Image (cartoon, rainbow, N blue to C red):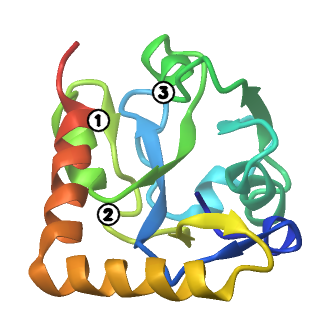
Amino acid sequence: MWVTPTRALVVNFSNPTASEGVYLVANRNLAAGKTSAADFNHPDVKLVAYAGTLQEQLARRSFPKATLVLVKGDESHLEPLLRNEAHAALVPSFAPRALVAAMPDKLVLPLDDRAVATAHTAVAMRKGDPDMLNYVNAVLEFHRASGWLAERARYWTDYAVRPR
């Protein structure tokens, strides 16, 4: 789960399990010539984000002039790009290049590998149980040191860009 201050009021979070960048992924044709974040901060630019998420907050703060297109959790944030209905989307990803490489004729990373923001993920658990928190942190450190967490991140990155 992404760590946010609002969520931390309700649950305790473990040490981070991963850090995930939020990238600007753009429609290759509609965003042609746009190479800076400022290029996407215009009223004629349609920017996609998941409603009620960090991406929506980030879009409103970083691209206040852009026309925001909000999608619900059951719709892919890339669909409006693939249908040529939006210029770009804010996409959380461990490997944005792999995502774009899966559809190079349709998508591009206009800011290269620069993330617009970073989000940390962690295990959430009920408040008031420090023993459980210590246990979960110990397990995470064990799996981080063994390389298992990094292997899982690679697996899920590959899974996300596999053709369905």
Label 2, on which residue? 112
The amino acid marked with disc number 1 is Ala
Label 1, on which residue? 160
Residue nearest the viewer, comparing 11 with 40: 11
Does 105 sit above or below residue 124? above
Residue 158 percent location from the top left of the image: 17, 42
Residue drawn 18% across and 18% down?
Answer: 163
Residue nearest the viewer, comparing 54 with 27: 54
Give the spatial CA distance, label 2 vs label 1. 19 Å
Q: Which mark is residue 97?
A: none
Q: Residue 17, located in which quarter of the rendered image?
A: bottom left
In the image: residue 36, left or right of residue 114: right
Does 94 sit above or below residue 133? above
Does 23 sit above or below residue 33? below
In the image: residue 110, left or right of residue 144: right
Residue 118 percent location from the top left of the image: 53, 73
Give the spatial CA distance, label 3 vs label 2. 18 Å
The amino acid marked with disc number 3 is Leu
Mark toward the start of the polypeptide (2 vs 1): 2
* Mark 2 crowd level (few <14, some 14–19, many ≥20, 10 Å Cα): some
Total numbered labels: 3
Label 3, on which residue? 78
* Mark 1 crowd level (few <14, some 14–19, many ≥20, 10 Å Cα): some
Residue drawn 21% across and 35% down?
Answer: 159
